[in-house]
Structure formats: C-alpha cells, structure tokens
Image (cartoon, coloured by chain):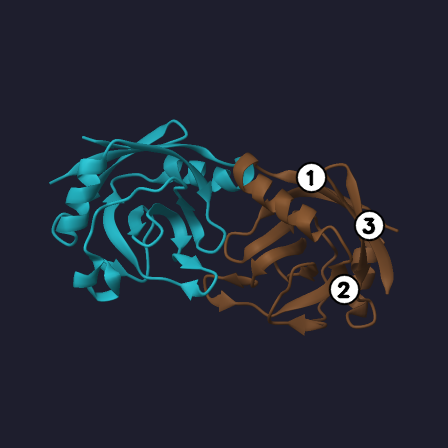
Amino acid sequence: MKRIVVEFDGKAFDAVLYDEKAPIICNNIWNALPLEGPATNTKWSGDMLRLWVQIPEPEARENMSQLQNPGDIIFLHKWNGLRFVYGQARMGGPSGAHHTPLVGRMLGGIEELAALGKRVEWEGAATIRVRRA
Amino acid sequence: MKRIAVELDGVTVTAVLYEDKAPVTVAKLWEALPYEDRVTHGKWSGDMFHTNTDLPLELDTTQWTFGMENPVGFQAPGEIVYLPVAKEIAIAYGEARFAWITGAMMVSALGKIEGDLTEFAKKGERLQWEGAKRFVLRRL
C-alpha cells in the first residue's frame, strides 16, 4: 500500500492508498500528489468532507463500496475530488446511495477530522493538503 | 393569509404560510415570531439549510399521522418545513429532500417563499462554503 500524509490545521496524519485493490485510481491520485484545496461538508452524504481537487479521472470502477466508515477515503466518478469520512456517512445524492471507489484509509486523526468537519459546518471551508509520505 | 419575512445573511424574501393545510402549527409558529438564529447547511438533505436553536411549538403531535400536521416527503425549492421532534425549521433552496442518518424523513410543510428565489438560493448555497449565517423569521 502506498503511504500518504493528510494535513490540516497544522497537523499531519498518516494514511494509505489501496493501490492493490484500486490500482488505476490510486495511481492517478499518487501521480497527482501533492494536492491541496478547500474542503466542505457534503450536502447529501452526512459526516464526510469533500476535498475540491481535480484528479485525472479513470474509466475504471475499482474497489466499489456501498457503505462507508470513519477514516475511509473515497473517490467519486463524475464529481471527482476526494472525500474523507469522519462519522455517520453514506455517499449519496438525490437519487439515493451511490457505489463509490474506496481508495484509502486514514490511519489516525479521525477525531481531529471530525472536529474539522464540525468547524467547517459553522465557520466555512478549510484547507486540506495530501502528499506522499 | 399569513405572510412572513425570511431573512438569510442580509437577503430578505417573503413567504406565505400554509394556514389551510397546517392551521394549528402555523398558528403556533406565528405566535413564536420573531425568531432569530444562525443557520447551517444540511449534510444529508441536498440544497437545504436548517436552524440550530430549538424552536419549540406546543403541539399535540399524537393527533396527526406521522406525528405532524401536513406531513410531506418531498420539498420544492422555497418550501419551509418544521420537524417537531428536532424543533427545527429547514428551508429548501434547490434540489432537496429532508433526510437524516436513517434516510428521508417526513416533515411538516408550513409555507413557501414567494417570487424570485435566486438571490436567496445563492446565500443558501454559500452556507456550505462560509459557515453559519444570521437567519430571521418575522411577521408581515
């Protein structure tokens, strides 16, 4: 598994990309690093931060997941970007839940991510940076 | 016909309350006005924001199907809804459907914003990017 670092609020947390299960998408993410952009909460999916960056979008639908857990990092075709799950969440939209590629996982910092999610709700978008470890 | 002013971050629109469809709840809401709060963007419901300070309306919810008056499962842009169990107001500004962790929920439809929603909807959308903003409901 490729190791990455997720940074926000002046803190850095280790994470991994599931390049064995989602090799094409994870390779695109890896090649796009470092990535930095604003993060907002999602509108349909619960406790999940959306990082507004652009990743070259592959055709492949790899390691598709239907349910998400805190710490999961997911990619969403068509809408692009990365999403970081920090609590009760399920990727969805007006038509219901979406299958989505599970591309990685935070190895720590989930409580800090949840605090960031709450702060973003009240104070507005915050910056998240993702880089290679 | 009861009408109210709905102010979000400096943009004010007017709304008609559904006195015919939800007479008891609308009357209680009318008594409770003015109401001021800081609203935040919803995380489950699409283009919708909600209040955060309890707006308790004294209602006998046992008398109605779904425990509320005028229950609806879908909301049109500009629709004003109330969830008795959470004592909160929510307003749809675009494509929205009130939901929580367990999925879509019935809510009590209490009124609808009149006229052009464009500027109000822009303010609603910005909540996701800028965080909580001042929100006021007043009688007209």
Q: Which chain is cyan?
A: B
Q: Amino acid at mark 1?
A: Thr
> Local crowd at mark 1 within 10 Å, few (<14), some, or many (≥20)?
some
Q: Which mark is residue A127?
A: 1
Q: Are marks 1 and 2 on the same chain?
A: yes
The earlier-in-sequence mark between 1 and 2 is 2
Q: Which residue is mark 3?
A: A5
Q: Chain of mark 3?
A: A
One can see residue B86 in this view: yes
Left-right relation of A61 to B14: right
x and y, in percent, of residue B23 in the image = 13, 50
Q: Is residue A117 above or below residue A48?
A: above
| Separation of residues labelled 3 and 2 (CA atoms) | 17 Å
Q: Which residue has dot 2 on it?
A: A25
According to the rendering, which colour does chain A have? brown
Question: Does label 3 lie on the same chain as label 1?
Answer: yes
Q: How far apart in space, not on screen, are marks 1 and 2 (Cα)? A: 23 Å
| Eye-nearest disc, 3 or 2 | 3
Quarter of the image with the N terminus of chain A is: bottom right
Q: Earlier in the sequence, mark 1 or mark 3?
A: 3
| Residue drawn at (82%, 50%) of the image | A5
Q: Secondary structure at mark 2?
A: helix
Q: Amino acid at mark 2?
A: Ile
